[in-house]
Amino acid sequence: MKLFFTLEAVLSVTTRIPLDDPDRMSDLLEYMVGEKVQYEDVKTALSVCSWAIMLEHPMLTGINPPSVEIQSREKWLEAVKGVHGTSMQITPLPTPLWASLKTERKEDWS
């Protein structure tokens, strides 16, 4: 089942720059991986979910906000929304994929 998430939350994951409320970004990551993302898993979840979103929505490739000036980002975000809409439908990761990545990461650390 696919759900809609704000474009800001989606771009926060793909660009790794906070453009939305952190809770919405967490909701997106948790929806995609199918469980609560633990602190030590955030970096892996961001990498995998960003990759999956780009595969599902290749038109987001190369979309990055301008400098840290908030006003510039707001104008940029409005322009991006004009092209891509205010929300995007996202597909969760297959459960075995996330479980395997978490296991692999833990094995690398032991």
Image (cartoon, rainbow, N blue to C red):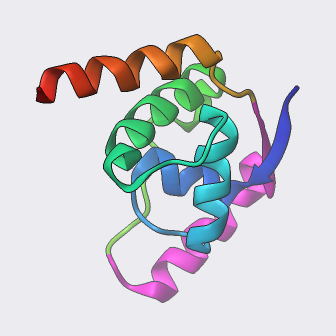
Is 85 in the magenta?
yes
Image coordinates for residue 58, horizontal then vertical, percent? 58, 25
In the image, residue 73 above or below residue 15: below
Q: Nearer the viewer, residue 74 or 27?
A: 27
Q: Residue at x 47, y 80 (%)?
A: 72
Residue drawn at x 42%, y 51% is 15
Quadrant assignment, res 102: top left
- Dividing the picture into quadrants, the one containing residue 54 is top right
Residue 57 x/y as whole percent: 64, 28
Magenta residues span 68-90
Q: Quadrant of residue 75?
A: bottom right
In the image, residue 10 lies at what x, y percent?
62, 50
Check residue 65 for magenta coloring.
no
Q: Where does the N terminus fall, quadrant-wise?
A: top right
Residue 26, can we see it? yes
In the image: residue 77, left or right of residue 91: left
> Which residue does the image show at 66% across and 49% down from the upper left?
28
Identified at 85% across, 30% down, the residue is 2
| Residue most extreme to the front | 110
Side of 29 relative to 107 (left or right) = right
Q: In terms of depth relative to the viewer, which is nearer, 79 or 96? A: 96
In the foreground, 59 or 5: 5
